[in-house]
Structure formats: C-alpha cells, structure tokens
Amino acid sequence: MIAEPTTFAPESEQDLDLARRVENFLHSKQMRSLRQVDVAAERGTVVLRGDVASFYEKQLCLSCTRRVAGVINLVDEIQVRDLNAVSMA
C-alpha cells in the first residue's frame, strides 16, 4: 500500500515564512538537488518532497531543516534517485 502524499495549504504568513526560511537554508548549501526539494509548512510541521541524488543529500536536507527555528515536526517524503542515470527504457 502506497501512502498518500501529505498536502498542506499554508494558513498564515508564519507558515509561508517558515517554508521560505527552510528553502533559503537548503539553497545555501549549494547542492543542485537540494534546490529542487519542495517545502511546505503548516503550524510548525514542515513537509519535504522531491528527489535527491544520494542518501547523504537526503540526510543533509533533513538535518538542515531541523535546524531552522520554528520547525516542530518534519515529514520526510524525499526519494533518493540517481539523478544522473540515463533511462534504459
């Protein structure tokens, strides 16, 4: 059974500000795949969704997000995929 993706509709300026601060922190790490992670926030719960190139990048993304002030809960929907692989289909 596949879990449904978590969706949030930001309710307040605080939610938008928190999501923006998480995005800015991830972008500051200068890793292309971290810039492609989608960030949503609602009442202190942050959802990260997207693809990264390695387990290290996933852990870095999660660790950085936990360090942002205001993050109470973290929902990890990040997938590790080889972003440089060529499809053989």
Image (spheres, rainbow, N blue to C red):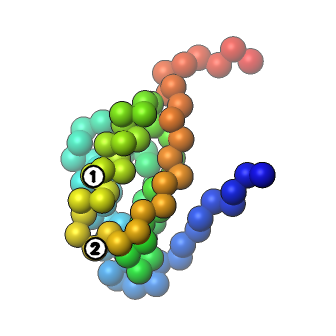
Q: Is residue 24 visible?
A: no
Q: What's the amino acid at mark 1?
A: Cys
- Determine crowd level at label 1: few under 14, some 14-19, many 20+ residues with C-alpha closer than 10 A: some
Q: Residue at x 42, y 34 (%)?
A: 55
Number of marks in picture:
2
Residue named by callout 1: 64
Q: Nearer the viewer, residue 47 or 11?
A: 47
Q: Nearer the viewer, residue 46 or 34?
A: 46
What number is the disc on residue 89? Answer: none
Residue named by callout 2: 70
Between discs 1 and 2, the one toward the N terminus: 1
Q: Is residue 7 visible?
A: yes
Q: Quadrant of residue 56?
A: top left
Q: What's the amino acid at mark 2?
A: Gly
Q: Can you give x and y, in whole percent of width and height, for residue 44 in the image?
A: 37, 75
Q: Label 2, secondary structure: give it.
A: loop
Q: Residue at x 31, y 57 (%)?
A: 65
